[in-house]
Image (spheres, rainbow, N blue to C red):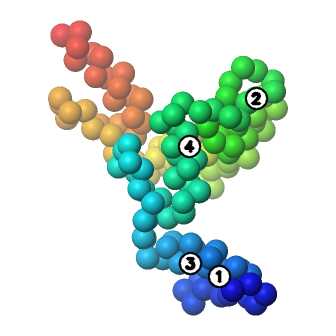
Amino acid sequence: QQGRRHRCNLCNYETDRLSNMKNHHRVHTGERPFQCHLCAQSFSVKSNLVVHLRVHKGERPHKCHLCSQSFSQKHHLKEHLYTHNGERPYKCHLCSRSFSHKSTLKMHLLSHTGDRPFKCPLCPQTSAWKSNISRHLRMHKCK
């Protein structure tokens, strides 16, 4: 139903479209009815599944006009463009560091918390960064 405002009774979200409200409500319920048939990922909105399927198909329709890189998702291209223009919009609220990628900020925040969620499957080594464990695993293969 369009024409009137629909308000979420659990938060401040509001919209003119009832379908948007149904999708939004899944934020609160955790419902993710759209499952990828190629992997275990599931999504609360069908359009997110459609975008995700590009990863499996190798589709990368979002091309950088400054270099040869292309991306499956528009927001990945947007973040990539920050590396060309030097913009670093993701700022750490605990120190003065800033980053061009949101994922890099998330990894950086682990340095403040002391969390080390990545563990070597062969020994007790842990790390805040998955890449460190990948590098560490190569050391096991050398032995």
Residue 23 in the image: state x and y as whole percent: 56, 72
Report, in whole angstroms, how far the alpha carbon at label 4 lies from the one at label 2. 19 Å
Q: What is the quadrant of the C terminus in the image?
A: top left
Q: Report how many numbered discs are placed on residues in the image.
A: 4
Q: Earlier in the sequence, mark 4 or mark 2?
A: 2
Specify few, some or many for label 4: CA neighbours under 10 Å numbering under 14, 14-19, or 20 or more: few
Local SS, label 1: helix
User: Is residue 9 shown above or below 117?
Assistant: below
**Residue, disc 4:** 103
Circle number at residue 18? 1
Q: Is residue 5 left or right of residue 112?
A: right
Query: Where is mark 3, residue-wise?
Result: 22
Q: Amino acid at mark 2?
A: Cys
Q: What is the three-letter code of the residue carrying label 4?
A: Ser
Alpha-carbon neighbours of circle 3 within 10 Å: few (<14), some, or many (≥20)? few
Relative to 116, does residue 59 appear above or below in the rendering?
above
For marks 4 and 3 on the same chain, the one whose residue lies earlier in the sequence? 3
- What x and y, as percent, mark residue 125? 25, 33
